[in-house]
Amino acid sequence: SQTIHQWPATLVQPVGSPLSLECTVEGTSNPNLYWYRQAAGRGLQLLFYSVGIGQISSEVPQNLSASRPQDRQFILSSKKLLLSDSGFYLCAWSGTSGRRSYEQYFGPGTRLTVT
Amino acid sequence: AQSVTQPDIHITVSEGASLELRCNYSYGATPYLFWYVQSPGQGLQLLLKYFSGDTLVQGIKGFEAEFKRSQSSFNLRKPSVHWSDAAEYFCAVAPGAGSYQLTFGKGTKLSVIP
């Protein structure tokens, strides 16, 4: 079966510091990968998605970037954090064939607090 | 642009009572439809999905949802709520046709009174 991991689970970082959040998927190959941010009362905002190694699409201009160095690894980064980057970050994966491409499965999330 | 509306921000029901959470979408064609559940501090879990065919779909944990094209709705139901169902519920829509991005509603928080 497939599993998705995110770390760290929680993170407290000062403004201006760098960020690296990691997401890995097991039990599948060549998944589509997604990064979302969830702010209280605002639902989920898609930040980035990737259909393959080195292929990143950005949905919202922001202080963040994403990379996919390996097939099942997705990294969310920032060079300098802003207070507004605080939130709950969720990674998700989906298959790549037929309807499985539309079913997204989520990791446990990372709670980021920028102080 | 497509949108998803969950009109109820917060619903409180008694344990054992029935539940219906509303979801309306705005999209020209029939999209693919999903319901997710999120417990506090956790990720989202897929409850059920609709692609085509039978408009009443069954999911996990005793949930079901009905697609009504004429009302652009995909409401989630459960005949008898358990205390463990207290969580936040999100409706999501994918346009299909090669676009894999989901648009989420803002969620409905469910509280269950013992």
Image (spheres, grey):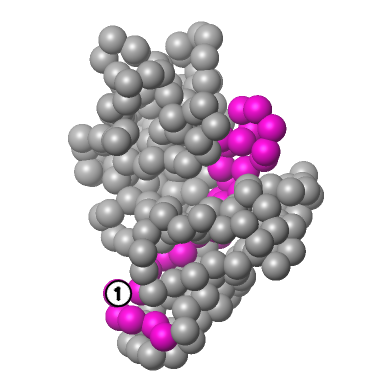
Position of residue B7 relative to residue A85, above or below, is above
Q: Picture quarter containing residue A107?
A: bottom right
Look at the image and say whether residue A97 sits in the magenta stretch.
yes
At horizontal 38% and vertical 26% (from top left) the residue drawn is: B76
At x 53% / y 44%, what residue is drawn?
B45
Of residues A11 and A98, the one nearer the viewer is A98
Total numbered badges shown on the rendered structure: 1
Residue A74 lies in the magenta-colored region: no
The chain ID associated with circle 1 is: A
Residue A38 horizontal side relative to residue B26, left or right: right
**Relative height, residue A17 to residue A25 (above, below):** below
Query: Percent position (x, y) of residue B40?
Result: 42, 57
Task: Give residue A34's quadrant in the image.
Answer: bottom right
Say which amino acid is labelled 1: Ser
Residue underneath mark 1: A84
The quarter of the image holding the N terminus of chain B is top left
Please provide percent x and percent y for residue B3: 29, 35
Tell me which residue sits at (52%, 38%) in the image: B100
Residue at the image position 38 percent from the left and 36 percent from the top: B91
Viewer-proximal residue among B8 and B25: B25
A57 or B79: nearer the viewer? A57
Q: Mark 1: few, some, or many residues within 10 Å (few <14, many ≥20)?
A: few
Secondary structure beneath disc 1? helix
Establish if B102 lies above or below B74: below
Residue A21: x %, y % from top left: 56, 73
User: In the image, which residues are magenta?
Assistant: A80-108
Q: Is residue B78 visible?
A: no
Q: Position of residue B13 (x, y in %)?
A: 27, 35
